[in-house]
Image: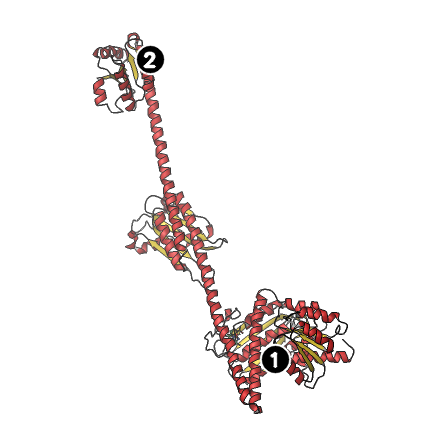
Amino acid sequence: MSPAPVRVLLVTDDEHAYKRLCARFEALGKYYSLDWVAGTEFLSSPPSQSSHEVYLLAQSENPNDLLKLVRAACKQGLKSPTILFKSPADGEVLSQVMAAGAGDCLEDASLDPQSLKRALDYAFLRTQFQRELESHVQERTAELVSAENTARRCSEQLLEVSRLSAHLSSVRDIPSVLRDATDAIRRIIGAHVARSALSLSSEEYQPINSVSLSESYVEDPDAVNRVGTEALDTLVARSRHVIRLSQAEVDSLPRGLCASPNMDNGMSFRGWLAAPIVTHEGQYIGQVQLTDKISGEFTETDEAVLVQWTQVAATAIDNVQLYEGMYDRDRRKDEFLAMLAHELRNPLAPIRNAVQILEFAKTDEHTVEMARQLISRQVTHLVRLVDDLLDVSRITRGKINLIKVPVDVAEIVEVAVESCRPLFQDRKHSLQVDLPNEPVRVRADLTRLAQVLLNLLNNAAKYTDEGGQIRLTVQKEENSVLIQVADNGIGISPEMLPTIFDLFTQVDRSLARSEGGLGLGLTLVRRLTEMHGGWVEASSAGPGQGSTFTLHLPVLTDDLPVQHPLAYQSLKEVPQQKVEGRILVVDDSRDSAESLATLLRARGFEVRTAYDGLQALALAAEFPSDAFILDIGLPKLDGYELARRLRKDPKSRDTLIVALTGYGTEEDRRTCFQVGFDAHFVKPVDLNALISLLASARRAVQHGGR
Ligand code: ADP
């Protein structure tokens, strides 16, 4: 096939010029065609851009007209017309037309066919080159515009995602977060279907699903069920990455993997885009899937936007969980404070009543005894509450140090049973204790382990109706010992069992419940047991079926001898006979000092009191004492300094010095012993323990022991 001729348009008002050129064109053959148009016509109605490849502009009389034509031709997109001068062109005119855009200049008079052909071919190539360049520029411009559109759309989408993030920060429940987020991502990416699923590890949350459909799906909501399969869900859960499939890829998937929705209703699903939702700690918590893009296929930009969305969704879910946790802790704290106020008031009311009773029943021995017992019971209860509170706070802050020594479990049992006996008698319970024949030794802090057992026994007594049967069994296994407290009381429902050892857990939280307590006891039991290398479990066949609590403790296998800590020796040996000795009691609370002095005098001691450190020093000089009982927070000279000075004085260097204080942390105890105290008691003191200590100190002095 012969190539199309190069079409040339001659622009001139000079007919002779046209004729001369026609003759030359004939010599060039059919590969060049020539048309002619007058200059005025060219200016008034320019030909279409593609009609000719080459413009030839013949020189007219007026150089300005020529310049006009050159400019008009350039505007036509043929940027470099060839100028045909009649005779050699004037240098200035030449440079003017070249500046206006002319591509070449010929001289009519000397134009032979070969030169014309070369000039035409050159002009043709110029035009071709210009056209290619132009189309290239157009293509690049289009690409830039499309990239700009994509970038604009992407930033709009990201803006939407950040708006979503702001919105979600005020949403307070997880189903709403998932619903709003799923709806938003479907709109942001522009898909007909978005589906997300969450399964949080925490037991409080059930798996949650959320689906968002475009209006065209509202008519056919079942369509969503045909999108995706369990196999795809598993793929997303395991992938940890965004997965994007084009429609062709979806169609080519095996049928089991993707129940392609294109089957029954001829609906096209235009691709599939999915991403896992992963927490900031890297834990997989759910996923989102989008199908059927409204226009075109899912793109890389959609993928990037979805990644941002998953982060926003994960953060929002995290925040709700944090908020709920905080709210829950706050609520439990409020409940706890209400309970605490109630529990503290409970014993105060009967104590106040008893004080009034004592006022009018001065000589009625029976009533006085009844009031005394009542006050004693309620104060013991109050002391336990405060002790438990402080213990829990110390244990949770890791501030309790156990003093572990080899002890026989029977001894721990004995101490605990003795302490709870009054409550058991009060409630008419029977307590059966089964101990193994052989001693079972554990390495334990006797005080703390007895406290654990005492808590379990007290609970058994509290949560069993009057006249119940409680059994304490100690059983040795290979390397451990089981200490079991079983009752036939109210029992525990299966749903409460897993949390029964948690702080503040109480089955009956109504303020009107009959049994006091702050829900701290079992937390202490668990923590203290764990601090002894053991563990504790609770079991119950259900409400009304009784409960069993079992401690598992490691037994001691070496031969270290059993030790009997002083505190418990004194607890057990409560001296009932009169004791002697001179005691100086120092306390800035006069009521505390005088009431203790009265009690000690009643037991046979000779007692003096002082209310500040300096007064105590002066009194110590004139009243040689067998023991000093010192408060720590004293005016003028605090208890620590007072003890230091007493220790320095040769007269009191070996005297028993006892701290009796409200400061009961391990740190306080340690400081006391460092400055020279012999013993440390927390207020209110167990009088029997104090008297035993004073009596034993007195005996030691008599036998020259101290
Ligand atoms: P408190 O007794 O002060 O409420 P605890 O931590 O000792 O706190 O016990 C927590 C809860 O466990 C109690 O409120 C009670 O509901 C339940 N519980 C504890 N021991 C028993 C038991 N032996 N029988 C039935 N319920 C019990």
Q: Inspect the image, locate mark 1, and give the three-letter code of the amino acid beneath it.
A: Ser
Which SS class for mark 1?
A: helix
When the figure is inspected, residue 224 is found, relative to residue 500, above or below; the finding is above
526 or 651: which is nearer to us? Answer: 651
Residue at image coords 33%, 22%: 128
Q: Left or right: 462 with respect to 85?
A: right
Image location of residue 14, percent across then percent down: 22, 12
Residue marked by disc 2: 92
Distance from disc 1 to disc 2, alpha carbons, whole Å, reads: 126 Å
- Residue 132 in sight in this render: yes
Residue marked by disc 1: 419
- Residue 463 in sight in this render: no
Residue at image coords 60%, 71%: 552
Image location of residue 598, percent across then percent down: 64, 83
Which SS class for mark 2?
A: helix
Q: Residues within 10 Å of mark 2 (few under 14, many from 20)?
A: few
Q: Inspect the image, locate mark 2, and give the three-letter code of the amino acid beneath it.
A: Glu
Residue at image coords 77%, 76%: 705
Q: Which sits earlier in the primary sequence, circle 1 or circle 2? A: 2
559 or 621: which is nearer to us? Answer: 621
Q: Residues within 10 Å of mark 1 (few under 14, many from 20)?
A: some
